[in-house]
Image: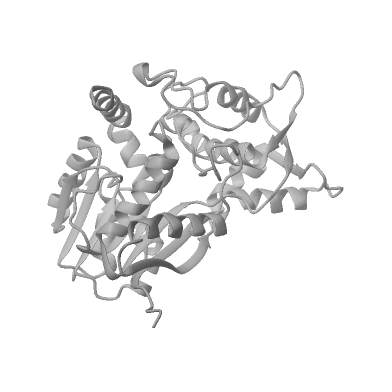
Amino acid sequence: MQRDHELTFDLQRYIETPGMGYLNGINGTSLESLVRKTEEIARLKDHLSFPRVIVSVGVGQGEELHAIHMLYGGLIEKIIGVDFSQLALNATRQRALTNNLPVELKFGEATKLPLPNESVDGILLSSLLHEVYSYSPNGKRAWNEAIQESTRVVREGGYILIRDSAAPNLWGNIRVHLRTDLARQFYSYFGEEYRVFSGWGNLKGRFSSNLPPFPLLEGSDTVTLSIGQAAELLFHFVNFEMGYPNDQEFIGNQRWKELNEIYYIPQDLTSPEPMRINEYVAEVIKQANLTHSNTEFELVCAEMGYSVRPRMFRPLSEHFFLALLDSEEISTEKSEELLRHFIDKMELVFKKIRKESDN
């Protein structure tokens, strides 16, 4: 128990160290950003028209809670935000006061939600489950528990919206050509530091990744990677490059928070390959229904889709060229087609229903 408490404390410090600059980077502060966030979660309203209580887990600085309020025209009885970071809760509290938002904030973890059974109509897990996986010594178990907890607190007829990076619908190995000095420098930096936690003191060595080691460049600008490796490399590069021009990030920075996150959940502990969307949906349903194995409820998928993020395409196409290892087709058009596989986001809606009677 003492070791668990120490790890919790170290993780809180880790998550809060980047400060408000990080929170304002992942959550916008402008009206334009708020409108965009409201559009991102709008599919929840397609399924859940008149909710009484909605929960957002992982509040950032409160933009998603603000967006929920906007989406439903302020007609929700209660909007609850849960977060592991007091910094995030304090920032959200300030945003709520400034904008007169009727939100209730709770300190807690996705794996142990501070909510009663069947107490909410909807729950949002936006870019959250990959963090749950990343910051646990047993990532898959923590991911399972977060799914089970979300299912536990949702009422019959309630919905869970999961938004996270979608694994490329590709198989085999891929040749990645590093087209620029920045891409080459980033590749070496990322290959050496990914999931090492070397800049975070007591966290070093407590977590791991099952991805195989990234090959050294050794004078070449082209490397062969698994789909899982390529996915992590390219998506981390996009997030890095967006901050690079403003000196928010720099090559060699060991305290860049995303450096230690796994964006794509592996199929299992023995495979470096990420779960594709169909596998992801099946695993969510499996874990959720373990919670209800002795009850009259089950979880089903109500909607499975993607959202396209075109602004991420430019940095990838500028810095990388891709070709499938076993393909004879090598062209700019094919490379751009492959790159687009790495920028989609999963938009998954699940519904809690009563099991059909066998009689």
Please, which colouring scheme is shown? one colour
Q: Residue at x 57, y 21 (%)?
A: 192
Whether residue 301 is visible here, answered yes or no, is: yes
Q: Residue at x 37, y 67 (%)?
A: 298
Q: Quadrant of the N terminus?
A: top left
Frontmost residue, 206 versus 79: 206
Residue at the extreme bottom of the image, as rendered: 359
> Compared with residue 206, is residue 158 higher up or lower down, i.e. above or below?
below
Position of the C terminus, as image quadrant, is bottom left
Query: Residue sitting at 44 percent across and 22 percent down?
Result: 197
Judged from this view, the residue extending furthest toward the front is 359
- Numbered-mark total: 0
Please state the horizontal and vertical placement of residue 237, each as a whole percent of the image: 55, 36
The residue lying furthest to the right in this view is 328
List x then y, in percent, for residue 308: 54, 58
Is 277 on the left or on the right of 141, as rendered?
right
Question: Who is closer to the viewer here, 81 or 285?
Answer: 285
Look at the image and tell me whether residue 178 can be seen.
Answer: no
Could you tell whether 350 is left or right of 63 in the image?
right
* Residue at 57% from the left image edge and 49% from the top image edge: 167
User: What percent of the width, then of the height, locates residue 100?
Assistant: 13, 57
The image shows residue 204, relative to residue 208, as above or below, that is above
* Image quadrant in which you'd find residue 120: bottom left
Relative to 356, say whether 332 is above or below: above
Residue 352 in the image, given as x and y percentages of width and height? 34, 68
Q: Quadrant of residue 189?
A: top right
Q: Is residue 276 left or right of residue 90?
A: right
Front residue of 263 and 281: 281
Query: Quadrant location of residue 224?
Result: top right
